Amino acid sequence: MTRQEYEALLKRQEYLTTERRQEVAQNLQTARGFGDLSENAEYDDAKNEQAILEAEIVSNDVKLSNAKIIDESDIDESRVHIGSIVTVYDKEFDEEVTYSVVGSAGNDPLSNKISQESPIGAALLGKEVGDLVVVETPGGVSELKVLAISVGKGEN
């Protein structure tokens, strides 16, 4: 993952383990005050919320401990890598689209940040300007032509 993705995940983890954990604990304490725990929907909801939070914390711990930070200054701009910004021509929609290829932690398709594990991200890895990429996506087969490749320089 890029340095920015790592730092964003670290910041999220800090928020979850401090502020969010306290909020959830307070919600649990409040729900306990509503009476009999066996028939207390608020308590059940608070316990579920706590379980989801703790699962995310554990997942983030694993990602952080296994993270490999990519130095964007070492990226070869002639090929697509994690940290690359890639402009492609989408034949089906007759338009140019620019993607940032990111690690799985930085995935945000609505902002055109695609994971290297996504169908398009995986298909673009290692490609050069001029390469034609045919990729099977959930929406069907897409044909993309790589038009430009650059390094994110902190945009991820």
Image (cartoon, grey):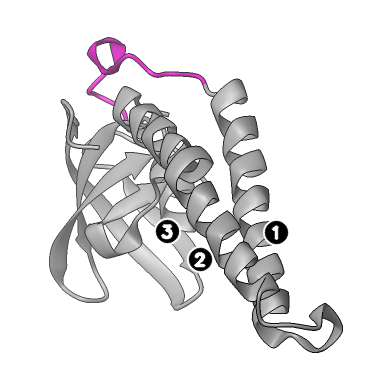
Of callouts 1 and 2, which one flags the residue occurring earlier in the amino acid sequence?
1
**Residue at the location (70% across, 86% down)?**
41
Residue span colored magenta: 68-80
Residue 44 inside the magenta-drawn segment:
no
Q: Is residue 51 left or right of residue 57?
A: right
To which residue does mark 1 refer?
A: 51
Closer to the camera in the image, 86 or 10 = 10
User: Principal SS element in the magenta part?
Assistant: loop
Judging depth in this view, the residue of 11 and 123 nearest the camera is: 11
Residue 73's spot in the image, x, y percent? 23, 12
Residue type pointed to by label 3: Val
Asked which secondary structure carries label 2, the reply is: strand
Residue 77 within the magenta-colored segment of the rendering: yes
Q: Is residue 34 visible?
A: yes
> Which numbered tag is attached to residue 136?
2
Q: Residue at x 18, y 28 (%)?
A: 154
Q: Are marks 1 and 2 in contact (CB under 8 Å)?
A: no
Residue 95 position within the rendered picture, expressed as x and y whole percent measured from the top left: 13, 68
Label 1 SS:
helix
**First of labels 3, 1 by sequence position:** 1
Q: What's the amino acid at mark 1?
A: Ala
The crowding category of the residue bearing disc 2, from other C-alpha atoms within 10 Å (few below 14, some 14 to 19, many at least 20), is: few
SS class, disc 3: strand
Q: Which residue is mark 3?
A: 134
Q: Quadrant of residue 15?
A: top left
